[in-house]
């Protein structure tokens, strides 16, 4: 199966549907399979104290104003749903609370996503797994025993899933990628393993593809200098197009593992092959 390439829009839309559409356009033109958002019920995810903290942003001077400014509601997601169908690209989102997962369940989405920060939220894991949609489970910031418990919930509900190897630093230094963990996760869980990257550049994601990742997820942005905590670890649209091309080239280059003489090699063999010491062809 081809690698599933996911462009995470996340909150890089900065609360603007027009920016979200431009990112959807960019992901579709780059050849991505899906775009992903993040959905929060702000008062459920953050305490009143956290929301009242001072924070300058385009929406005001409190953390709460910033969080609300970044959040899409029903009208915006209805338009995203319509627009993605028009563009022929799947969309889905990671819910950060139970109400947000109920909200997303209103849409006919192909995938669910468990963000790394939610791996310890057992009630959310149960709700997502009970839906039975194919789920990407990110594994940043967690111990193996915590990931074990999450996987066990999805197995209990017989919900199809794959684990995504992930380091949750933004941006991630390449030396922290530890891509060999992907083999360890495949062995431990007997499932497909993808890669969710937060590094600058494309090399690490390409290496993950060569090491057998079944999905690659990268944040997408119009401009890495835009406002937002995820922008610096994101890939601009031209870079996303290069990444998709590199991944598809890697897939083709990996082949099937069967040693054979290729059609083009036959022509070279006819003119270059030597036997014995006579120099005869």
Image: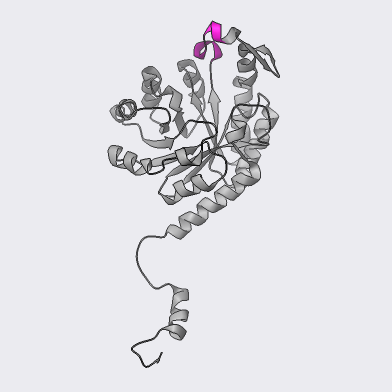
Residue 185, by quadrant, is top left
Is residue 86 inside the magenta stretch? Answer: no
Residue at 40%, 91% (x, y): give it.
Answer: 279
Residue at 36%, 19% (x, y): give it.
Answer: 122
Residue 140, by quadrant, is top left
Highlighted range, magenta: 40-50
> 101 or 194: which is nearer to us?
194
Residue 169 rendering spot, x and y as whole percentages: 50, 31
Residue 123 rendering spot, x and y as whole percentages: 38, 17
Number of numbered markers: 0
Residue 218, by quadrant, is top right
Coloring scheme used: one colour
Q: Main secondary structure of the magenta part?
A: helix
Residue 85 rendering spot, x and y as whole percentages: 59, 37
Is the residue 97 above or below the residue 224 in the image?
Answer: above
Residue at 36%, 35% (x, y): give it.
Answer: 160
Q: Quadrant of the C terminus?
A: bottom left
Residue 201 rendering spot, x and y as whole percentages: 57, 44
Q: Is residue 72 left or right of residue 146?
A: right
> 188 or 38: which is nearer to us?
188
Is the residue 41 above or below the residue 92 in the image?
Answer: above
């Amino acid at each position: 199966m081809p690698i599933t390439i996911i462009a995470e829009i996340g909150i890089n839309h900065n609360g603007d549907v027009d920016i979200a559409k431009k990112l959807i356009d960019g992901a579709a033109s780059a050849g991505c399979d899906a775009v992903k958002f993040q959905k929060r019920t702000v008062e459920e995810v953050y305490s009143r104290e956290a929301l009242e903290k001072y924070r300058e942003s385009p929406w005001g001077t409190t953390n709460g104003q910033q969080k609300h400014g970044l959040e899409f509601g029903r009208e915006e997601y209805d338009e995203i749903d319509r627009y993605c169908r028009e563009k022929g690209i799947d969309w889905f989102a990671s819910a950060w609370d139970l109400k947000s997962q109920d909200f997303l369940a209103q849409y006919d989405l192909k995938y669910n996503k468990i963000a790394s920060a939610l791996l310890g939220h057992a009630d959310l894991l149960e709700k997502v797994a009970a839906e039975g949609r194919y789920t990407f489970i990110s594994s940043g910031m967690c111990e193996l025993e915590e990931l074990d418990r999450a996987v066990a919930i999805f197995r209990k509900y017989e919900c199809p899933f794959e684990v995504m190897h992930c380091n949750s630093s933004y941006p991630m230094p390449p030396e922290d990628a530890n891509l060999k963990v992907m083999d360890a996760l495949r062995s431990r869980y007997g499932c497909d393993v993808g890669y969710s990257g937060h590094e600058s550049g494309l090399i690490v994601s390409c290496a993950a593809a060569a090491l057998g990742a079944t999905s690659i997820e990268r944040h997408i942005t119009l401009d890495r200098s835009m406002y937002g905590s995820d922008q610096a670890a994101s890939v601009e649209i031209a870079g996303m197009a290069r990444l998709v091309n590199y991944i598809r080239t890697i897939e083709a280059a990996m082949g099937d593992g069967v040693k054979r003489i290729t059609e083009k090699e036959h022509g070279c063999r006819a003119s270059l092959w030597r036997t014995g010491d006579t120099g005869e062809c």
